[in-house]
Amino acid sequence: VQLQASGGGLVQPGGSLRLSCKASGINFAINTMDWYRQAPGKQRELVGSISSGGNANYVDSVKGRFTISRDNARRTMYLQMNSLKPEDTAVYYCSVTLGRLFWGRGTLVTVSS
């Protein structure tokens, strides 16, 4: 299983970023996929998930600002982040549960002026 997140960077408050997660080694189309994040000095938290059918759910702190989507043909999941806040600063990871939780390499998002 390989999961590679990309698309992070430095953005000003109120700005937007789109993260991507490319998966290999799994039957991507049938699996629920997750986005997690870990802010400095804090525990990793679930940001949201998307089912195989495309239904997404989110942690309250990002509802209305973040959107998870997926392209099964490209084996890729996306996280569109709008109205970013400094508290969204974190390393973002994608993951999948296949008996156990598999993590990919994260991508750093820094929201700062």
Image: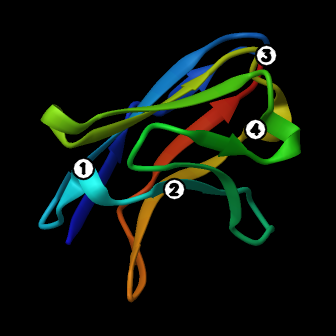
Q: Residue at x 87, y 43 (%)?
A: 60
Q: Earlier in the sequence, mark 4 or mark 3?
A: 3
Front position in the image: 100 or 44 = 100
Q: Would you name the residue on which mark 3 appears?
A: 13
For label 2, count other residues whose C-alpha is less than 10 Å away and answer few (under 14), some (14-19) or many (20+): many
Query: For the residues marked 2 and 4, what is the alpha-carbon distance in whole angstroms?
Result: 17 Å
Viewer-closest of 35 and 89 = 35
Q: Quadrant of the N terminus?
A: bottom left
Residue at 75 percent across and 24 percent down: it is 112
Viewer-nearest of labels 1 and 4? 1
Of callouts 2 and 1, which one flags the residue occurring earlier in the amino acid sequence?
1
Q: Which element carries disc 3, helix, strand or loop?
A: loop
Q: Quadrant of residue 27?
A: bottom left
Distance of label 2 from label 3 (alpha carbons): 24 Å
The amino acid type of the residue labelled 1 equals Ala
Earlier along the polypeptide chain: callout 2 or callout 3?
3
